[in-house]
Image (cartoon, rainbow, N blue to C red):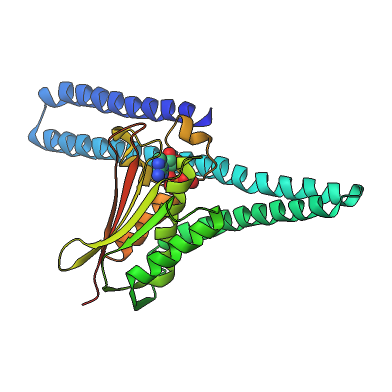
Amino acid sequence: MVVPRRRKSVGLYIALGVVLIAVSLLLYAGWVANPRSVALLILGGLMLAALIAGLVLNTFFLVREIRLNEQQDAFINAVTHELKTPVASIRLYLETLQSREVDEAKRKEFYGTMLEDSDRLLSTIEQVLRTGRVGSSRYKPHLSEFDLDVLVDECVQRARTANQLPEEALSFKAGLSASVMADHEEIRAAVSNLIDNAIKYSGKSVNVAVETVAADTDHAIVRVRDQGPGIPKTELKDIFKRFHRVPGPTARVPGTGLGLFIVRSVAKRHGGRAWAESEGVGRGSTFVLQLPLAK
Ligand code: ADP
């Protein structure tokens, strides 16, 4: 309940700032309207301008500070949960293995689950580290020329194996046959995020189509289309913000709200764009990553 309380206080600070500006305007208007000399009039005007500028700046910094705190809360809430859950699960399995005899089949099952949990843990840690890297201009992308079709195909194969999906549940149509000059690791992370989301939010009936096409003579497009829960139109922009998760049923699916921030940051770092399209709730989603082609 921390976020709504903070939101209320942002409103309060803005209102306070506005009221203060209005009061000082009224006070000075009364004084300036009855000036005793031109010099005083000018001095009063300058002071009034300085006072208003100070109040505006103060309100601006206050709001920025509160937003930053909000983001930190969201980060702690989202990431702590995603870190704690798999660790708690691994610990439980280890305790069971330590405290009693477990037959071979069960033991194998436990090891499998522990491996899945440690993968989840690693992927959360990777997301957090990558968010820091792609969000900072200090880290430059390592550019190399590679075939985008090949990279997307690798991402699709990996997702198929990891989620044990048949080809018809996750299809890929390579329609580009062109190279991009980009950071291989970053593009792989961005494409994998889109594919993983499409699978994750589709639940039990996965029907995801991935394709690469040329948008025009200078740009390539990777398109990931699913038949999952869809996204309300009002959320299509906000989902790319750091830590933003759509409230409602999809928020029950585990996640940190970092994946799409990474996708958009990676696109921007390469002079490209990323956006989402959806006809609304229950009508699937399409995510598009547009990247410039190698010259
Ligand atoms: P995460 O999946 O960890 O929450 P993302 O940044 O990848 O973080 O996604 C942000 C939000 O966008 C998700 O919480 C979800 O509400 C929504 N979203 C992303 N991809 C899809 C999708 N394919 N279908 C429906 N909703 C999606």
* Residue 30 located left or right of residue 84: left
Compared with 11, 179 (above or below) is below
Q: Nearer the viewer, residue 182 or 34?
A: 182
Q: Residue at x 45, y 41 (%)?
A: 202
Q: Residue at x 24, y 62 (%)?
A: 213
Q: Nearer the viewer, residue 69 or 213?
A: 213
Q: Position of residue 189 (x, y in %)?
A: 44, 62
Q: Nearer the viewer, residue 31 or 24?
A: 24
Compared with 220, 171 (above or below) is above
**Residue 19 falls in which quadrant of the image?**
top left
Residue extending farthest to the left is 38
Which quadrant would the C terminus be assigned to in this image? bottom left
**Residue 217 falls in which quadrant of the image?**
bottom left
Q: Residue at x 15, y 35 (%)?
A: 45
Compared with 293, 114 (above or below) is above
Q: Position of residue 221 (x, y in %)?
A: 26, 60
* Residue 100 located left or right of residue 8: right
Answer with the quadrant where ligand 1 appears in the image: top left
Compared with 124, 44 (above or below) is above
Total marks shown come to 0
Q: Position of residue 265 (x, y in %)?
A: 36, 57
Q: Residue at x 33, y 33 (%)?
A: 232
* Residue 63 visible: yes
Q: Nearer the viewer, residue 149 or 136?
A: 149
* Residue 67 visible: no
Q: Position of residue 154 (x, y in %)?
A: 44, 67
